[in-house]
Amino acid sequence: MELQGKIIVALPERSGTSARGEWKSQSFVVETHDAYPRKMVFDVFGADRLARFNIQVGQEVMVSFDIDAHEYNGRWFNNIRAFDVRLVDPSTVGAQPVAQPAPAAAPTAASAAQAPFPPMQDGGDGNADDLPF
């Protein structure tokens, strides 16, 4: 899966020792440029990947990631791990042409007659709606 956005947070690097040796991991938060921006936290595992990707706050990136889940003490947790992070040219963000709506014509009597809901008429009692309450 892929997601494009801007890196807004770089969390502290974590490291440790396992049966396989030393390890390093770091989490980052990326925010999309949608009408309603979404945020996703993802992990980069391995000192070699951290050095190769060299992710910095403020960069525009395309994140390729895998999603997996694991169970611990009867609870399930998602794990989003990036396997590739590429820089994106910030000048191309939002550069896709957006279709502009045609200017609205002034309403005419013919268009009002074709409207799915004609304008409400006052029933003569001063109350324009027909609700019983």
Image (cartoon, rainbow, N blue to C red):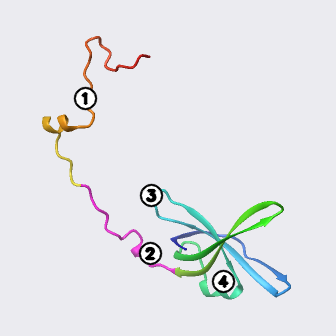
Q: Which residue is mark 2?
A: 90
Secondary structure type for disc 2: helix
**3D distance between C-alphas at marks 2 and 4:** 21 Å
First-in-chain label (1 vs 3): 3
Spatial separation of the CA atoms under disc 2 and disc 1: 48 Å
From the viewer's perspective, is the residue at label 1 or at label 3 nearer? Answer: 1
Q: Quadrant of residue 133?
A: top left
Q: Quadrant of residue 117?
A: top left
Which amino acid, by three-letter code, is at mark 1? Pro
Q: How many marks?
A: 4
Please provide the residue range marked out in magenta: 87-101
Numbered disc in front, either 3 or 2? 3
Q: Position of residue 64 (x, y in %)?
A: 56, 77
Residue 70 painted magenta: no
Looking at numbered disc 3 in the image, what kind of residue is underneath it? Ala
Q: CA distance from mark 3 to mark 2?
A: 17 Å
Q: What amino acid is found at the position of numbered circle 2 in the picture?
A: Pro
Sequence-wise, the earlier of marks 1 and 4 is 4
Q: Which residue is mark 4?
A: 50
User: Mark 2 packing: few (<14 Cα in 10 Å), some, or many (20+)?
Assistant: few
Split into 4 quadrants, where in the image is the N terminus?
Answer: bottom right
Q: Looking at the image, do the residues carrying marks 3 and 2 touch, with CB atoms under 8 Å apart?
A: no
Is the residue under label 1 in contact with that under label 2 (CB below 8 Å)? no
Which circle marks residue 119 in the picture? 1
Q: Main secondary structure of the magenta part?
A: loop
For mark 3, what is the residue? 35
Q: Which comes sooner in the sequence, label 2 or label 4? A: 4
Q: Residues within 10 Å of mark 3 (few under 14, many from 20)?
A: few
**1 and 3 marks in contact (CB < 8 Å):** no
Drawn side of residue 91 relative to residue 116, left or right: right
